Amino acid sequence: MHSQTQAGCDVLVLMKRIGTIPALAINLLMVTSLVTIWLVFAPTRIGGQASYVIIDGNSMEPLFHRGDLVIIKKAARYEAGDIVTYSDSKMRAFVIHRIIAVEQDYFILKGDNNSWIDAYRPTKDEIIGKFWIHIPKLGETMKWLRTPINLALAIGILGGILMAGPITQPHHRGNRRNKPPTRSMGWFEATLYALGFLTLAFLALTIFSLGKPVEREADDIKYEQTGVYYYSAAGAAGIYDTETLHSGDPIFPRLTCVINIGYSYNLSGQMQEVSGTQQIDARISDEQSGWQRTIPLQPETAFSGNSYTAIAPVDLCQVQALVSTVEEGTGFRPNTYTLTIISQTSVTAKADGNPIYDSFTSSLVFEFDKVHFYLAGKNNESDPLQSSKSGKAASANVQPNSFRFLGLEWNVFGLRVLSLGGLGLSLLCLLIFGWYVLQATKRDPQFVIQVKHSSLLMDIYEYDFEKNQPLVEAASIDALAKLAERQNSVILHMTRDRLHYYFVKSDGTTYYYMENEKRNTETNHAKRTEMS
């Protein structure tokens, strides 16, 4: 009990001697505040996590009004009821509306004050973020500052306010001698500043990392359905390059009536237990009149696995005969007709244990007349023989959570370990530093003065007192240090017989302060004994 009380007294004496360092505390608080503000409110364009939206309409009234500022943040998932901002590629604008439904990979949105649903349905990648903070009318101020002349005016006013402080301060007499000194930072302050900054920085990172979950739902599993058509038939010798007609070649029914239509389906992605059904139909139609006729080519057939292949023969002479019958009965004779081969696939699978139900329709389109059939869209950039459809499936697994900062991907668990380890190490260093200062103070009471006023002290061996010069004793070393700062001078330090003398010369007067090392040691010991 006695040792604990004595240690507490030592700490009180040390704190009393060292005093507070308000400028250091303010700087540390300012740096910590800036780091926290950056982590929370930095825009996404410069590596942050927040986006800022100025309301420019009435579609979300009465919640948001024109001129309000809304801050949004990226979220891992979006659900019905969330207010989000998305990029509308058709309007080339950003829209902030509420999600009312989710259909597969697309979100259906609507303004609270609108009677209609948004025509554009964004995907998750097109959503900028979810509503976080609402500040009424602040957007008008930000709009005003966007104008260059207004921004220049605001900067000028702010600069004038900052300059008003030095202008209104009273001037000191004299020139350079009365200017406040430029004080360099001593090793004690520099060490304390560095350790304090690291502690607060790691504390901010710890709070930030503890506020985010270590794991999150795994990303959706992407899959893709692909359908590829091909056809072939026996060709007449000397008409084609080979005796077999291949995909992409025009087809002349006078040379061959029957062609074989082949279709290959493939489901790519991390899918399990894949199965489904597939059927192929032929549809003859006329775009001008709207007439069409569907002919089954292959009935609904079950399959299992990620891929399958089907082949169906098509009698082109029968197609032309059907068209001729329609023309004779209706009297309508268009120049060309369309023959569309349609493959309809329904698939069932599992992704990470979650069931998936999807469908896929792929078409092969021919244009034809009285003479020949030819592949439609052959001159387009897309492949008329191939089509695909992408999809996503929700995953039941979890994965390590991460976030983007300064253009890099950071793992939350790794950041948490780093921040906690750094916080513990910095606190340990602060304790070791405090213990070292306490022990040094016990050994040498002058240590506090040397540390606190190291930038003003200059050791000397002798000091010559001028005759008839006033000699005034200062009440404390702190009072002497303030005088030295006002005079832009140093404190001269001289040691004689365990006595420490400190001098400052000002306007013909020598101010001094004396410390008796032995007396201080005995006095401190007596105080500790009395308090114990």
Image (tube, rainbow, N blue to C red):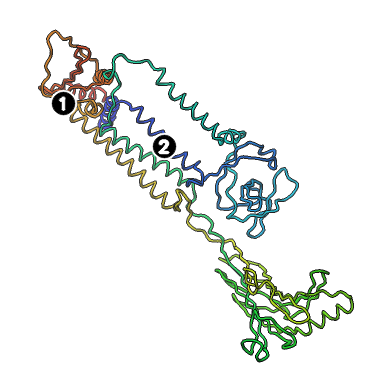
Amino acid type at image mark 1: Asp
* Direction from residue 405 to residue 378 in the image, left or right: right
Q: Residues within 10 Å of mark 1 (few under 14, many from 20)?
A: few
Quadrant assignment, res 145: top right
Which numbered disc flags the more N-terminal residue, 1 or 2? 2
Quadrant assignment, res 66: top right
Residue depicted at 27% across the width and 39% down the height: 432
Q: Nearer the viewer, residue 132 or 520?
A: 132
* Direction from residue 71 to residue 160 in the image, left or right: left
* Numbered-mark total: 2
Amino acid type at image mark 2: Thr
Residue depicted at 26% across the width and 25% down the height: 532
Q: Secondary structure at mark 1?
A: strand
* Direction from residue 104 to residue 24 in the image, left or right: left
Q: x and y percent of residue 376 in the render?
A: 69, 73
Establish if 17 lies above or below 132. Answer: above
Q: Residues within 10 Å of mark 2 (few under 14, many from 20)?
A: many
Establish if 71 lies above or below 290. Answer: above
Q: x and y percent of residue 189 in the render?
A: 29, 32
Quadrant assignment, res 382: bottom right
Q: x and y percent of residue 258 in the render?
A: 72, 86
Residue position for label 1? 459
Q: Secondary structure at mark 2?
A: helix
**Alpha carbon distance from label 1 to label 2:** 37 Å
Please report contact status of discs 1 and 2: CB closer than 8 Å, yes or no.
no
Residue depicted at 24% across the width and 26% down the height: 453
Q: Which mark is residue 417?
A: none
Q: Nearer the viewer, residue 389 or 33?
A: 389
Residue position for label 2? 32
Establish if 154 lies above or below 54. Answer: above
1 or 2: mark nearer the eye: 1
